[in-house]
Image (cartoon, grey):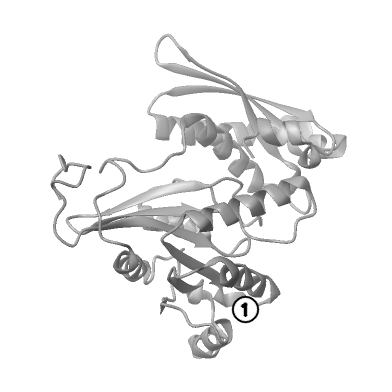
Amino acid sequence: MSDDLDLSGASTPPGFRSGFAALVGRANVGKSTLLNRLVGVKVAIVSPVPQTTRHRILGVANVPGRGQIAFLDSPGLHRPQHHLGERLNETARQVAGEADVLVFLFDASAGFGPGDEHVRLELERDRGTRPVILVPNKVDQMNKGKLLPLIEQASGEWGYADVVPVSALSGDNVARLAEVVLSRLPEGPPLFPLDYVTDQGDRRMIAEIVREKLLARLRQEVPHSVAVVLDRLEPRPGGLLHVDASILVERPTQKAIVIGKGGAMLKEVGTEARKELEARLGTRVYLKLWVKVRENWRDRDPILHELGL
């Protein structure tokens, strides 16, 4: 595909396809890992903590001369316990509504449970005529002899346009999934410039990387009570980027956990986040972190609005 392709469609090759494909499923089934694999670069943070994804994330994959796929990652659908959870579900439904193709992931290694059934019912209600591709993920972690019965269980009485088992972590069969998604998109010119990768700006990316480093260290209920707000993002002379960020928690006990003994955890988080930010931004970064208690912030609409949720 030519780098000077006319986005108006005048230079679009015959049969070129483009459109949006939404990655949907319950929390912690590997949607963000799959998005990063499909796009070829890290555009979404990843952790083993459910509900890590809190925003709509766009990742664009170009198939030279043949098409452009705009993948949309979304929060996992779940039964909300806070206003935050309600906002996340609303975002997931909006993402599904934007798409030309729905890519329904479930964790094959864990089976097809009530949470997956809940997502299926949501999709069935709103899918219309759009194709849905069933994607059993994490197939590298299961007995392959159990895969076909699991697919039959997941399908129920509802047929899918395609079924593509993958391992997002290892990349197994992910290229095949991209081909299947592309074949289901409508014909048309590219929707984005060919060098466009994601809509995640620097401010959100910085906050999310800090949160990712926190999630890698936190356990039990604490990860769900953590948010990161950028207070300052200021270029300085000599190619230095000064970043001040606040880590929000809901209780003083959580603040103590995040800071760690003698400030050890906060220092580790800051060091790891700074190194990744410097690698991604190509500049030196001075990162200063504070931990602040905001009681019940997950139920406080002004704070959710400040977080872009």
Res 32 visible: no
Residue that label 1 marks:
112
The structure residue drawn at horizontal position 62% and vertical position 35%, both measured from the top left corner, is: 308
Q: Is residue 224 above or below residue 16?
A: above
- The image shows residue 256 at horizontal and vertical percentages of 81, 35
Pick out the residue farthest to the top. Answer: 237
Q: Nearer the viewer, residue 178 or 305?
A: 305
- The image shows residue 304 at horizontal and vertical percentages of 70, 36
- The image shows residue 38 at horizontal and vertical percentages of 38, 58
Task: Give the secondary structure at mark 1.
Answer: loop
Q: Is residue 217 left or right of residue 30?
A: right
The structure residue drawn at horizontal position 62% and vertical position 40%, both measured from the top left corner, is: 211
- Image quarter in which the C terminus is found: top right
The structure residue drawn at horizontal position 41% and vertical position 76%, both measured from the top left corner, is: 164
Q: Is residue 152 above or below residue 224?
A: below
Q: Is residue 177 left or right of residue 206?
A: left
Q: Nearer the viewer, residue 186 or 102?
A: 186
Q: Is residue 300 above or below residue 187?
A: above
